[in-house]
Image (cartoon, grey):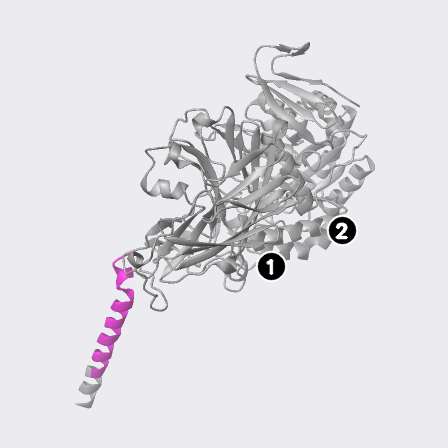
Amino acid sequence: MAVKRVLTLLLVLAALAGAVYVLLQGDKLAMKPVSRQAATAPAVINPASVQRIEYKADSYRKVAEDGRLELLVNDAGHIRVRDKQGDFVWNSDPDTGLEPDLKGLWKSNADSPFLVEYVDASKQSTGLQFNTANLNDAKTKTTVAGTEGGAELTFDLQTLGIRFKTEVRLKNGYLEVSVPSGSIVESAGKEVVSVWPFPFFGAVQKQAVQEGYMLVPLQMGAIVPMKDEHQLLSRVSAKIFGNDRAIPGQPGTYTIFPAFGMKRDSHSYLAVIEEGEYTSSVHATPSGLYTSFHWIAPQFVYRNAYFRQTSKLGAGYKTVEKDRSTENRRIRYYFQSGGQADYAGMAADYRGYLKETQGMRQIQSDAKGLPLYLTLYGGAQESGLFAPNFVSATTFGQASSVLKGLHEAGVGPINVMYTGWAKGGDRNVMPDVPPAEKELGGDKGLAALAREAQANGDRVFLQADYTSSRLNGSFVPSRDSLKDINGKVQSGKTMGETEYVNSASVALRLFEDNVSKYEALGIDGMYFRGFGSVYSNFRASDPATRAQAAEDYRKLLKLAKDRLGAAGAAEGNSYIVGSLDFIQQLPMDPSYDLVATKAVPFLPIAIHGMVDYSGMWGNLRDSGKTDWLRSIEYGAVPQYLLTYEDSSELRKTAGSFIYSSKFAEWKDSLAAEYRRWNEALGPVRGTFISGHRELAEGVYETRYANGTAIVVNYNETAYTRNGLTVKPLDFAVTGKEG
């Protein structure tokens, strides 16, 4: 009987446990989204009991003025900025009366100084519904308080229980707009997902502008023309610095600088997101989509939407982060007028911003000429019967022969970027440092190459990628690998081996451990791959935001420069551009976006004269002469990737992308191209670009601050104008002054 009672008790306990499990896990078992609930019962707001506030549109009053700008604010919280230099007023409240058919939500949005996206976490439902609120629909109470140089605007969205502040002030000739994170208050179960400050600032209808466009941060810069009919009625949405790998399901775009702008006839502005840029997006909306206005706006994201995985089979649901970002948000608006009111004028202001905030300085003129940036590919492994085989493409001794041959052909100075140099060659991960691959000549051979190159006025940089690792003594996946918001370790397979994503802090630590070994080799610096992407980290022992990750990358680059002399990287993302001595493969391709239809050299104009940058390797271009001319037009330095042996030897290795690189076959054409390149751009290497324009279809002029102008002709026929003739598929240098 005692045994029977015990068994009965165990069965009852098991049943109770099962019931509890079903109650707790029932949604997951049914593969339905789990509802988010507020930690405490939210305050109840009856929207019908809140009275709508009517604001006078003409209640503007001046709150600040300096030598260039005048700032006005009205009772609703709209702003107007008068540019005295161009006597033009930029306003955040477009005249929606110009569009009689505009009604409902989008009229309220266009009339509002903000848009707030939010979720209601208090509702019991099968998922979260994303909502948008504006000034009128949320029955907002605006309070305007004067501050030094401007005003503090408090927006109380009374029907939602959400409140936040926006500060506007004039500073040194520009407008600063900021949203202090500490000013955001949430209640009634409503949670802020994003804020759009002054979304319709500068908005204009197509018929009200003769010449205009919106500048968007795609690649090196692209524009959305205001007069053209777009192929698709869609907007350009650019997430600054692309997607965050730690946030699954997040869309991304190729965006390497946090700025946008608008040109309206002889007036323009540039907006630079200088705080909170890692969690921000830019949206450019053409006329005909939602409203008849062209408008471009920033979106400050406080909670990322992501796919919450609930099983190893991939089931889950879309939700938002539980915790709100605590980063402040801040934008600078620079204004241009007259001849400066275009993307070149915007780029000049961005150049000034980079000089101020990142300490970038002008390159000092070098009588030795334009440097050739030469990537030498050492070698890589291919699969073997029992173990990998190393395939040598350029030994350190052969590298010396390549440099000697190029100098004899009139090329130089040469900055060598050696890739595939370490043990095992090009493995796309942090190399073992040292030793250098013994089949290439080992540490002694590499050190000898560096000494010989330096004696001849050249420099040797070693390539490394500290953003990924394979199992080794320095890297432990359970401790070091990056985790996404679902707690999943980020990894992938490369050449049959598991490759883990490093957090930025781990990348910094690994480089700190190895920098003395690089010093012992006597090299001139490092070239880093992988810094073109910046990820947050949700590992509990090493959490980091994207902003913190970018700061770790800057620390790594500073260490490389302090200890080794110089540092370079790919793509030139703005969070590291001030830490670089050269940029490999700055994006300079045409725009393939159906709305932002034309690429413009915004970023090259901004950084030329302060840092060297290149386009694609000269021997691996997609469009041959066209790509070469584009490099000349945009002020890029020459760059090639060479091997001493035939590249066909690499076809079964990580170097299989190299289809033509043998030095003996490229020597003469490289030398001929370099000579013309140096004649054109050597004298202006350290000179700022002052202007850029299209002279005719397929013909572009780049002007430099010293008076030099370079005209590039992409056409199959000659271009002639005012005594200047440019041959087909060629360029000409003119207008030199000193």
Whether the magenta-drawn stretch holds residue 21 is answered as yes
**Within 10 Å of the Cα at label 1, are there few (<14), some (14-19), or many (20+) other Cα atoms?**
few
Answer yes or no: is residue 164 visible.
yes
Q: Extreme left residue here?
A: 1
Label drawn at residue 552:
none
Report the residue marked by disc 1: 473
Whether the magenta-drawn stretch holds residue 596 is answered as no
Q: Main secondary structure of the magenta part?
A: helix
Separation of marks 1 and 2 at Cα, in angstroms: 21 Å
Quadrant location of the C terminus in the rendered image: top right
Answer yes or no: is residue 658 visible.
no
On the rendered structure, is 519 left or right of 422? right
Q: Is residue 427 above or below residue 716?
A: below
Residue in the foreground of this view, choosing between 668 and 151 = 151
Residue at the image point whose x is 45% and y is 61% from the top? 185
x%, y% of residue 377? 64, 36
Q: Extreme bottom residue here?
A: 2
x%, y% of residue 607? 66, 36
Q: Is residue 292 above or below residue 563?
A: above
On the rendered structure, is 197 left or right of 711? left
Is label 2 in a helix, a strand or a loop?
helix
- Span colored in magenta: 9-32
**Within 10 Å of the Cα at label 2, are there few (<14), some (14-19), or many (20+) other Cα atoms?**
few
On the rendered structure, is 620 left or right of 562? left
Dot 1 amino acid type = Gly
Report the residue marked by disc 2: 520
